[in-house]
Image: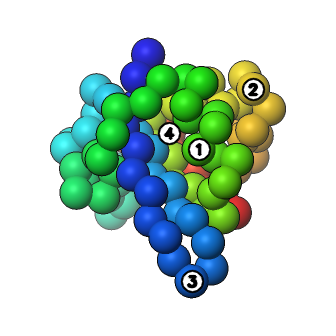
Amino acid sequence: MSFFSKKYDTEKGIVVAVCDEDISGQIFEENELVLDIDRDFFCDVLITKTELLEILKDAHTANICGNKAIEFLVENGILYEAHIKTIAGVKYAMMF
């Protein structure tokens, strides 16, 4: 299982964008909601599950998209179901 990740250095800290490898570049729509997994925003490096846990340790904020990434983070106690939203069957969450 692999994920794409991109880090952004901001004045408030590191922002991390993560998505499942297999949904990069796709757009999901449900009613008036749109989830755009833009390659420019999410895709810098391909990472493993272990690397995902490591990069989140330093993140001030994280934008996470994809059922695999979300479920892995729930299993590891990083995210909770109450923080997860779904658009067109694709889970996403913001961590602060």
Quadrant of the rendering where the N terminus is positioned: top left
Which one is closest to the eye, mark 1 or mark 2? 1
User: Compared to 12, does 19 lie above or below?
Assistant: above
| Mark 1, secondary structure of its residue | helix
Which one is closest to the eye, mark 2 or mark 3? 3
At a point 19% along the width and 44% down the height, the residue shown is: 25
| Mark 4, secondary structure of its residue | strand
Q: Could you say where residue 55 lies in the image, as x and y percent from the top left?
A: 59, 44
Q: Sort mark 4 into few (<14), some (14-19) or many (20+) by Cα contacts within 10 Å.
A: some
Give amino acid for label 3.
Glu
Colouring scheme, one of rainbow, by chain, secondary structure, one colour: rainbow
User: Compared to 29, does 10 lie above or below?
Assistant: below
**Residue 55 has which mark?**
1
Mark nearer the N terminus (1 vs 2): 1
Residue 40: name its quadrant.
bottom left
Give amino acid for label 1.
Ile
Which residue matches tag 2?
Answer: 76
**Residue 5 has which mark?**
none
CA gap, disc 1 to disc 2?
14 Å
CA gap, disc 2 to disc 3?
29 Å
**Residue 91 has which mark?**
4
Give amino acid for label 2.
Asn
Q: Do the CB atoms of the residues marked 1 and 3 lie less than 8 Å apart? A: no
| Any part of residue 33 in sight | yes
Mark nearer the N terminus (4 vs 1): 1
Which residue matches tag 3?
Answer: 11
User: Which residue in the rendered view is the most extreme toward the right?
Assistant: 77
At a point 33% along the width and 50% down the height, the residue shown is: 42
Give amino acid for label 4.
Lys
Mark nearer the N terminus (2 vs 3): 3
Which one is closest to the eye, mark 4 or mark 1? 1
| Any part of residue 89 in sight | no
